[in-house]
Amino acid sequence: MPPACRASLATERLPRTGIGPEAALADVFSRVAPYAMQCGHPRFWAWVQGCGFPLAALGDLVAACLNAHLAGFDHAPAVVEQTTLGWLGQLMGFPPDASGVFCSSGSMANLLGLVVARHHLKPARPVLYASAEIHGWAPKALNVLGLPSAALRLIPVKDDFTLDTQALRAAIRTDRDNGQTPFCIIGTAGTVNTGAIDPLDELAAIAAEQQLWFHVDGAFGALARLHPDLAPLLSGMEKAGSLAFDLHKWGSMPFACATLLVRDSAAHHAAFASNPTYMASETRGPLAGGVPFASRGIDLSRGFDSLKVWIALRAFGVDHFASIIRRNVEDSRRFAAAVQAHPDFELLAPAPLNIVCFRYTRPDTDLDAFNRELLLRLQESGIALISSTVIGGRFALRLANVNHRSSPADFSLLLETLARLAGQQTGDWPPHPAVDARARLHSFQSDCPD
Ligand SMILES: Cc1ncc(COP(=O)(O)O)c(C=O)c1O
């Protein structure tokens, strides 16, 4: 973002009188859109941010134009929302009478899942379990639930970054011996760092045997179930008491579009239902059937988030999205193999799904600092956007691929560019002409097939 643009946006005065719709919209296209993060670019692979689907964006526009209120009510949008939830439940292997709700984010969907679990089991001295690789939504959720952070037992992971079930069993035993009340096991279907999939079948069995709630955070990974080749990786997920996943990640939907499914619909309803006099359910009129979606989460006023999903699925079919996911996994595995084959890079973790963690290894200097600088140079080049994490204490470059616009050439260009930028950093290789980042960003639209 040019400094002048940033300054003009940041210091914009409260408009007492308007400049008119044309000028206001023109400003969006000249000052905001060109400097948004461009997650629609074919070489955007950062932070598991979905890349957006134009038809689904149109769905959002239509939803906004209808401005339908989705607390429930007896109108067609509520039927569409329920039908779409039913489709998602079916795709995830949940029973037809399972409950569900659309919500703003995976963090929210996971939080709501834990609220249902705790409300249902009412543990006296609650403790719950997840792998040490769990995403940062969990400590926030504990805070909201009024639980101390120590109530979440972080179970060590094995070499492949999946939860060690022996350690889990031992932790549950110790907690019971100490008078704690274990109530929930959280399995992750695709960890944020590496895409590792916890042994979900085994976790489901332990939860059943110990009479604990089994919640699965499938923020992005759950969507791999859409493709029959990948579904076996997630075996056991369908046994969860609750499952959270984001269609705004691997479902290509625009933000915000996350889902919580709950196997026991009565437990779901009991956790959130309220019956205010001003919204009492009727047998006729708009309140016929009440406000079921408001009774499955926190929000009363809710937008028509399912419309974009409904439109996209009807227009292209599930198989289209499944094939994107399959291709993303194939491309990521190929990229991981290219990293492994490259003399100057190394993989820092297995890449079972669509996340690849790696680093440049050539210099003898501080590799963490070197790779951090390499990442920033890549980001500033405008050629590709990836992000980073820390794996086993080592700074890692991290590619998270949910991009339906990337071609194999894009991945080759990423590795070539990293090698070139790293060479410039070490001074080994002749410097390349500077890349005009803004020109790259402005031109990306012509790169995009849709
Ligand atoms: C495994 C996992 N869980 C939860 C989340 C949080 O989802 P959201 O960003 O939609 O809140 C993420 C985000 O990347 C994630 O990767």
Image (cartoon, rainbow, N blue to C red):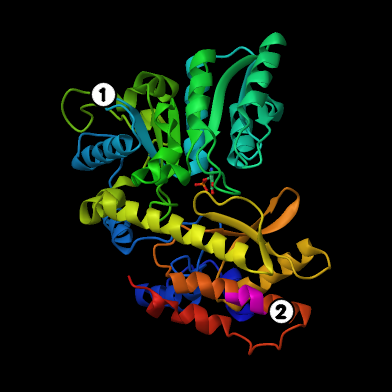
Q: Residue 291 at what x, y percent from top left? A: 30, 30
Q: Quadrant of residue 76?
A: top left
Residue 296, compared with residue 35, is above or below; it is: above
Q: Residues within 10 Å of mark 1 (few under 14, many from 20)?
A: some
Give the main secondary structure, helix, strand or loop, of the magenta stretch.
helix
Q: Residues within 10 Å of mark 2 (few under 14, many from 20)?
A: some
User: Residue at 51% across / 84% down in the picture?
Assistant: 439
Left or right: 29 in relation to 8: left
Report the residue marked by disc 2. Answer: 423
Report the residue marked by disc 1. Answer: 281
Q: Residue 186 at what x, y percent from top left? A: 55, 30
Q: Is residue 377 visible?
A: yes
Range of residues picked out in magenta: 416-420
* N-terminal-most mark, 2 or 1: 1
Q: Amino acid at mark 1?
A: Ser
Residue 447, compared with residue 63, is above or below; it is: below
